[in-house]
Image (tube, coloured by chain):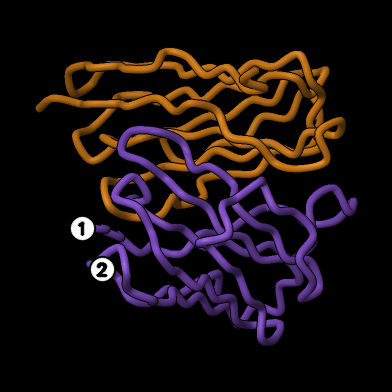
Chain colours: A orange, B purple
Amino acid sequence: TQLLEQSPQFLSIQEGENLTVYCNSSSVFSSLQWYRQEPGEGPVLLVTVVTGGEVKKLKRLTFQFGDARKDSSLHITAAQPGDTGLYLCAGEDVNAGKSTFGDGTTLTVKP
Amino acid sequence: DTEVTQTPKHLVMGMTNKKSLKCEQHMGHRAMYWYKQKAKKPPELMFVYSYEKLSINESVPSRFSPECPNSSLLNLHLHALQPEDSALYLCASSQDPPLAGGHETQYFGPGTRLLVL
């Protein structure tokens, strides 16, 4: 059973478009992270959200943590080719006693 | 500084070889992790060390043997691997262990790309 459901799995858009990636679970998370990973490299941390309802902005990226701390979203405005990569959400599951990753969203931004 | 370093970056080994992967962090983090990642899949947790002691082993085959010589170093010893073990091996660290009520965000190294022939 996948604790963190991430959608969509694949996303291909044109430069300048907006997009949203979702991370959902039936479990409560004490914190949730979003990472971006390029092929052959390690995941790079983008943000950690901790408080239910929290919204964080990082330039063109907006991250939201659900009020119940069971879901999160990543919104990218005016996507650029440099945003291409694998986006992963990960969370500390209070019931499982460890962190878990979503399946990832492969984003391709075409010039 | 949130840097985790891993060596080597690439490794090719035969099924009868013995090799080791190394990971280092100097952030004073108290938890360190090994993950295995196949192409276009999320990382899969293998081991967690908390305060230099093995706290989680995700039923990993004994041909993978972790070692934590001190609070900054984490090794993964490899012996008699199979071709299906070829993958990107990632090390990560966090200030506090999972669900300790502290700072659990994990910072990843660049990985070691392993090919088993």
Badge 1 or badge 2: first in the primary sequence: 2
Label 1 Cα crowd, 10 Å radius (few <14 / some 14-19 / many 20+): some
Left or right: where does residue B24 sit relative to residue A66? Answer: left
List x then y, in percent, for residue A76: 40, 26
Residue lying at the far right of the rendered structure = B101
> Residue B15: percent from the left, percent from the top?
30, 63
- Residue drawn at x 22%, y 67% is B12
Badge 2 marks a residue whose secondary structure is strand
The residue under label 1 is which amino acid type? Answer: Leu
Quarter placement of the C terminus of chain A: top left
Please say if A33 is above or below A71: below
**Residue A33 appears left or right of B50:** left
In the rendered image, residues at marks 1 and 2 fall on the same chain? yes
Q: How far from the left and from the top, in percent, is residue B64?
A: 53, 62
Give left or right: position of B19 versus B59.
left
Q: Quadrant of the N terminus of chain A?
A: top right
Q: Residues within 10 Å of mark 2 (few under 14, many from 20)?
A: some
Is A87 left, or right, of A102 in this rendering?
left
Dot 1: chain letter: B
Residue located at (50% from left, 73% from top) = B77
- Residue visible at 60% across and 69% down in the picture: B66
Marks 1 & 2, CB-CB < 8 Å contact: yes
A48 up-or-down from B102: above or below? above
Which residue is identified by label 1?
B117
Q: Residue furthest bottom?
A: B70
Q: Amino acid at mark 2?
A: Met
User: How far from the left and from the top, in percent, is residue A13?
Assistant: 22, 16
Q: Mark 2 highlights which residue?
A: B13
**Label 2: chain letter:** B
Between B34 and A94, the one lying in front of the other is B34
Residue pictured at 46% horizontal, 33% vertical: A61
